[in-house]
Image (cartoon, grey):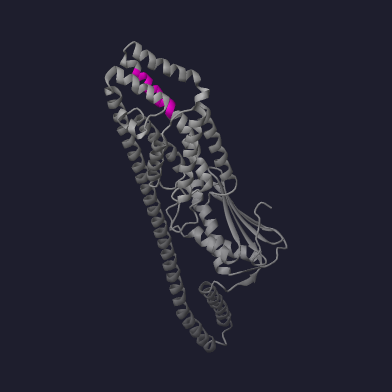
Amino acid sequence: MKGPGRNIYAISGFIMMVYGQFFPAMVSEWTSHLFDMIEQSILQNESGLLLRASFTYITWNVFAFMLIYSGSMLSAEAVSKDRKRPVYQLSFAFIVLINVFLYNMMYNEYESYFMHLMMVITYLVLQLIIPEQPFSLLAQFVLLFLILVSFSWLDLYPGLAGMNFGTDDFAASLKVADSYLSEFEILQNLSLSFFMVFAVLAVIFTVLIYLFNQQITTMKKVQEQERELKETRDALLESNVYKEIHALVHDLKTPLVTVEGLISLLEMKLARDEKAVTYFSKINSATSKMNEMISEILSEEIKQDINVDDLISYVISHINFDHVNIDFTWSAENNIPPVKVNRIRFARALSNVIENAMLSLGEQKGYIHFSATNKEDGVLFRVEDNGPGIDQENLKKIWEEGFSTNNSSGIGMPFVKQVVENHQGTVRVESVPHQKTTVEIFLPFKQGDEHDFNH
């Protein structure tokens, strides 16, 4: 962790430790009340008051040291973000023990260093299991809380007095009262029970966090595998379709050559028939154009200059406008410079966009407007319809192979994007559900130029 993040952790940790150190002074009334309860439990020979005093002491102790331990943890995080590194672990242990020393000096107490060292070791061992995730810091706080509650109860266990557990004034007073009321029976059973409960909870919590992280990791791996499988499937689908089209188009060349040869023979035989010569000339022109189209389909790199008006006319001539309910209009600005395109593929891309608009309208009445605008650095083709539109969720998926909202093959828009990008162009789709959909294709005059659709 670098920069501002480290500073925030350090400052937050320092503030929490200061509050922890001054907590007893800030709750002096609580302290007096606790001593009163201990005294009254002895005077009234009332074990119930002793139990209340014990729970009050645990709450007081956990609150104070939760601030100190949490502040120490954040300060150690400022030193090293990686909790598994010795730098973090040694920093945390050192800061905690320094705080215990200052606490004892300030209040003339006898907090056991051994007990706090045991808590530090327990925390550092368990936190190794907690993975680095966005929620891990919160998990660390919860783990600290459970460990503090667990070990705080050991302060009241009479049998551990020889190991310097429970040497502070409150714990010592509670054990004296218990020895008078029940000969240590109450606190011995109570403290051991709660220690075990919260110790087990700390372990269970740590294991659950670990298993939860494993589940998240597994889910991410599954999602990544599904994404890779989908990409592989889409690439295979695209590759197969592409290969089949190429094979089919390539096969068309053979009969086309035969047709050209036979026409040449017939033209020679019927050279004196003027009508036949005219017909043969038209047939030769048509076969030449078809041969040119096949060459353009087979090679994406074949690009020729073409007038935008001619390109639009070519696109419109290949679209079926039998749908009487659709009002189709088109416009093109005057004096748009020619564009260099693979006429067959680029025209097919524009046709796909228009046909998608027609499919979206279905049988309902609507309009489709196709326009071409000179944008100085290129031509902006725009197709707008007032169909049902595309919702935001599906808008992100229209470029995926196989995705379709109208039960078609789903290769239309991905093909459009592929062709446009092959021409160094850009394409975007905007849609307002139940109002309109707009597809804009920018084709630069000079390949490599980028276009800002907002200008």
Percent coordinates x, y for residue 329 in the rendering: 61, 54
437, 83: nearer the viewer: 83
Q: Residue at x 34, y 42 (%)?
A: 208
- Quick one: which residue is furthest to the top in this view? 44
Q: Is residue 197 left or right of residue 67?
A: left
Q: Find out whether residue 31 is within the magenta segment.
A: no
Q: Residue at x 43, y 28 (%)?
A: 61
| On screen, residue 83 above or below 279 | above
Q: Is residue 64 visible?
A: yes
Q: Residue at x 31, y 12 (%)?
A: 45
Q: Determine which quarter of the picture holds residue 58.
A: top left
Q: Determine which quarter of the picture holds residue 11.
A: top right
Q: Is residue 391 visible?
A: no
Q: Is residue 65 left or right of residue 198?
A: right
Q: Which residues are magenta?
A: 50-61
Q: Find out whether residue 51 is within the magenta segment.
A: yes
